[in-house]
Image: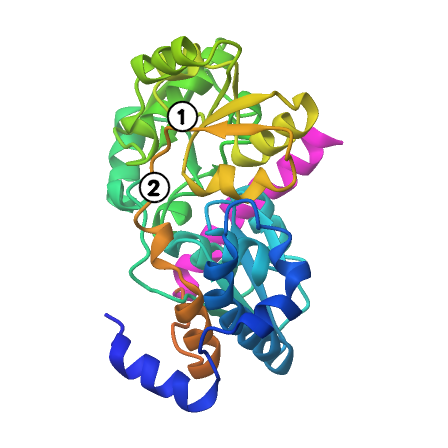
Amino acid sequence: MLDVTTIRAELAAHYDLAPSVDLARDMADVHARMDRVMPFPDWAIAAPYVAAINRLKAERGAVVLAHNYMTPDIYHGIADVVGDSLQLAIEATRVDADIIVQCGVHFMAETSKILNPAKTVLMPDMEAGCSLAESITAEGVAAMRAQYPGAAVVSYVNTTAAVKAASDICCTSSNAAQIVAAMPGDTVIMTPDKWLAQNVAAQVPHKRIVWWDGACIVHERFTPGDLRDFRGWYPGLKIIAHPECPPDVVAEADFAGSTAHIIDWVGRERPSQAMLVTECSMAANIADAHPEVEFLGPCNMCPHMKKITLEKVLWSLHSMTGQVEVDPSVAAPARRAVQRMIDLSRQLAA
C-alpha cells in the first residue's frame, strides 16, 4: 500500500502543488475541456498537479493512456490517449514513448506491458484491480475447456495475463459479438463476464455460447426498474447501456454498446436528455463536448478506477515506481491472444 504521508512530503519538496488561482487561469484552455463538471475552485486545486505531470511527461519521454472511466482531471488534463479497452490496447502498440503510464486498472497495464515488453509500464496504484479480472484464473479456463472439449475460449480483456495466456483470443465489449461469430465450431466459451456473454448470445444466435459466472460490480447493480423509473420522471429520455449490464437492463435501453460506441452514439444522436447506464465518469468526460445534452443519473462508481489520482500519477512518474512486469512465459501466449483480437478487429473493420 502506498504511504501517502511520505509521498506527499517528497512531492512537496520537488513541486509547488499548492492550489493556485493564477495557474488555474493560465491553464484556462485545459479547464475549458471540463468546466461543465469541474468548478473553478476544484480546478485551482488540480491545476498544479496537471502542470507538474505534463512537464514531467516531457522530461521522461512518457505517454499517459487513460480509460474512459478516469476522472475528468486525468481524462482531459494529462491523458495523451483516451479510449475503451480495445482502443487503449491498439494505441499501446503504436506509442513511441519509452514510458507508458496506465491510468486505468491493473489488467490494462498488464496488457500494455504484454504488447510492449521492452517499454516501461507504470501503474500509479497497483491495488487498482477489477472484479472481473479477479473472478477467474487460468485453472478456471482449463476447467471450462475440460467441460467443453474443442470449444474456442474467448476471454474478455478484463482478465489477468495468465488468463489471457490460457485463452485462444481476447475480446472487448466493442468487438465481442464479431470475435465470437468468427470462431470455429458451434460452441464458444466466453470468460469471465456472464452478462456480456448472454448479451453476445442474443446477437450471435447461430453459436452456442457458454460462460464463466463473473460480473462487473459496477454494471451488475443496475436494474430494469431503475431505467423505467427514470423514463417515468423524464419523458423522452434516451438510455444508453453498457453490455456488461444484465440482459434485462440492456433490453430496457435505447442503445447498448462499449464505452467507445456510447460516445459515438451520443455524438451522432445528440439527445436532449441522456442517461448512461455505466460508470459515473463516462458522462462527466463527454459532457463538455456535448453541451446540448443533459446527462442524468443514476450511475455507479468503480472503486478500483477511482484509486488512480493525479497525485499518484505524479508520484509514479517522479519515483518511477509501480513498474508492471509480466513473466515472459506468460506474456508470449497472452500476447498472441491479444494480438489475434487486434488483428481480427482490423480485418472485420476493413
Local crowd at mark 2 within 10 Å, few (<14), some, or many (≥20)? some
Alpha-carbon span between mark 1 and mark 2: 19 Å
Q: Quadrant of the C terminus?
A: top right
Viewer-proximal residue, 182 or 69?
69
Name the residue carrying label 1.
196
Local crowd at mark 1 within 10 Å, few (<14), some, or many (≥20)? many
Q: Is residue 326 shown in magenta?
A: no
* Magenta stretch in the rendered image: 327-350
Identify which residue is drawn at 49% across, 39% down.
Answer: 282
Indicate left or right for 121 with 215 as reference: right
Viewer-proximal residue, 27 or 169?
27
Q: Is residue 113 visible?
A: no
| Residue 130: % across, % down | 32, 47
Identify which residue is drawn at 39% across, 23% down.
Answer: 197
Give the mark nearer the N terminus: 1 vs 2. Answer: 1
Q: Is residue 285 visible?
A: yes
Identify which residue is drawn at 29% across, 60% down.
Answer: 127
Under mark 2, the amino acid is Met
Mark 1 residue element: helix
Q: Is residue 349 shown in magenta?
A: yes
Q: Quadrant of residue 289?
A: top right
